[in-house]
Image: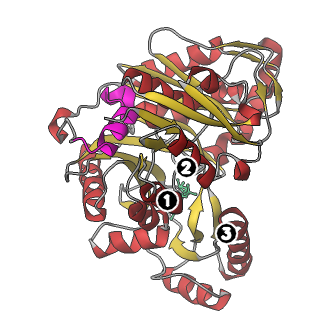
């Protein structure tokens, strides 16, 4: 097993990894930017080293600098968390070159699966259902029009390098297509330095259901059930739950088996997520694979009692999976709310909820300065229960208990969200926020006088 692991990340996920390393009796070396000097991860890691200024390109994204620190401090491995370098094949390759284990799949896999079009083609070749779409990349508006006409409107222009909902545009007819094509490309060029796009049929109001995969370097693959992540704002997840309510047992089984097959055909050997969109008739289509730990992994951990970060570290060290599919059972229900900052500034007072069925993942504290430099997520609140309603009630209780003063957040909106009938019924799809978002925001604003 590793003796010392470098963490190339910050915030809640850095803390999550440090905690796990402590559980495993492994030393942690945290690299941080000047903006994060006064952070809980810096205080809790075995060793913390400042690697540069707030600007991510000069700190958290500077792979060479991070690798130098890893070598100098005698680390055996690097955990990239999510975001930053976690899906950077070049970085993973450099880790290998310098004899440091990248905690994730091989760089070849990161490269292959990170390119959505390549991943789609691979899945298609092996009979995994994918969203109908263009065969290859689209390099002109004329070609886009031609392909869209073949696929049939509405369509979605997608950046092959896309992530975080960026580089994606809908078009309901040919008039909209030109603008959608151009904006998707421009956005992708700016965000990923790669403006290659392809076209998919837009599945109208699908559910986003993803399968958690765990695989080792010895050919063993299991899945740990699904998560419903359909509550999204601008293609970004706000609330996730496990298991997916209302999914038939037959579809659940088929999706699990398909996800395992997708992992097998790609030669996958780490934790990963297979994402599907699911239509009203429960036809499901592969959209992409994420080759890293996901933000929403705790809902799966809560329901399966498997420590995914620990497993990720184990398999990266070459250990065999200590479980087979039959060992995994999904028990109860879990819901996660993402608490995002709406302003920067100092956290004047903080009290996190606790109690039965509540887990909080965050590195916030009273006095913490929320900076504008990084992702706006401040905390994840995860609640669980024997029934889905119990998990939801506990989420309401947790959000009522939360005190976070000095910084504006979406906490009240998340609270109001948990009262929407469609959410309670569990019948929502990705159109949920579009249909109820404004109402929820209004209700949250109106409730200000009562808090
Ligand atoms: P990203 O990598 O940017 O997160 P994804 O490919 O995972 O992009 O898609 C993000 C979200 O966009 C999905 O969760 C889903 O809500 C929506 N989406 C993606 N592809 C389709 C599609 N073909 N039809 C309808 N919605 C889609």
**Secondary structure of the magenta portion, mostly?**
helix
Rendered position, 263 above or below 59: below
Numbered range of the magenta stretch? 300-319
User: Closer to the camera, 87 or 253?
Assistant: 87
- Image location of residue 421, percent across then percent down: 55, 31
Residue of label 3: 193
Residue 417 in view here: no
Which residue is drawn at the image coordinates 36% and 35% (left, top)?
2
Which residue is drawn at the image coordinates 73% and 29% (left, top)?
37
Give the mark, 2 or 1, whose residue is nearer the N terminus: 2
Q: Which mark is residue 67?
A: 2
Number of numbered labels in the structure image: 3
What secondary structure is marked by label 3?
loop
What secondary structure is marked by label 1?
helix
- Image location of residue 65, percent across then percent down: 63, 50
User: Closer to the camera, 339 or 191?
Assistant: 191
88 relative position to 43: left or right: left
């Amino acid at each position: 097993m590793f003796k010392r692991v470098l963490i190339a990340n910050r915030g809640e996920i850095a803390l999550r990894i440090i905690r796990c390393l402590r559980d495993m009796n492994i030393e942690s070396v945290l690299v941080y930017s000047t903006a994060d000097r006064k952070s809980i991860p810096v205080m809790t890691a075995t060793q913390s080293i400042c690697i540069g200024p707030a600007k991510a390109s000069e700190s958290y994204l500077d792979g060479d600098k991070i690798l130098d620190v890893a070598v100098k401090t005698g680390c055996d491995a690097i955990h990239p968390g999510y975001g930053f370098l976690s899906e950077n094949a070049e970085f993973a390759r450099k880790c290998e070159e310098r004899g440091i284990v990248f905690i994730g799949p091989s760089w070849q896999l990161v490269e292959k699966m990170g390119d959505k079009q390549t991943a789609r083609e691979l899945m298609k070749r092996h009979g995994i259902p994918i969203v109908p779409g263009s065969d290859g990349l689209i390099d002109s508006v004329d070609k886009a029009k031609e392909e869209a006409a073949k696929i049939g409107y509405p369509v979605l222009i997608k950046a092959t390098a896309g992530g975080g909902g960026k580089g994606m545009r809908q078009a309901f007819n040919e008039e909209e297509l030109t603008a959608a094509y151009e904006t998707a490309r421009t956005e992708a060029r700016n965000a990923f330095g790669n403006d290659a796009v392809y076209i998919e049929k837009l599945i109208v109001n699908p559910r986003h259901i993803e399968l958690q995969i765990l695989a080792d370097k010895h050919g063993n693959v299991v899945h740990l059930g699904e998560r419903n992540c359909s509550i999204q704002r601008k293609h970004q997840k706000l609330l996730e739950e496990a298991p997916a309510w209302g999914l038939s047992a037959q579809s659940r089984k088929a999706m699990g088996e398909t996800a395992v097959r997708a992992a097998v055909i790609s030669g996958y050997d780490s934790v990963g997520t297979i994402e599907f969109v699911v239509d009203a008739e429960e036809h499901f289509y592969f959209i992409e694979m994420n080759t890293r730990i996901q933000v929403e992994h705790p809902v799966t951990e809560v329901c399966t009692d498997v420590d995914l970060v620990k497993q990720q570290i184990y398999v990266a060290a070459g250990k065999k999976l200590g479980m087979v599919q039959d060992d995994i059972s999904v028990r109860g229900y879990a819901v996660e709310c993402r608490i995002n900052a709406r302003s920067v500034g100092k956290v004047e007072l903080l009290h996190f909820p606790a109690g039965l069925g509540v887990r909080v993942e965050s590195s916030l504290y009273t006095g913490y300065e929320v900076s504008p430099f990084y992702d706006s997520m401040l905390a994840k609140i995860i609640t669980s229960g024997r029934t889905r309603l119990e998990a939801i009630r506990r989420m309401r209780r947790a959000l009522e208990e939360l005190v976070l003063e000095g910084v504006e957040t979406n906490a009240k909106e998340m609270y109001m969200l948990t009262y929407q009938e469609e959410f309670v019924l569990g019948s929502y799809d990705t159109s949920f926020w579009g249909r109820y978002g404004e109402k929820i925001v209004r209700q949250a604003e109106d409730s200000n006088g009562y808090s």
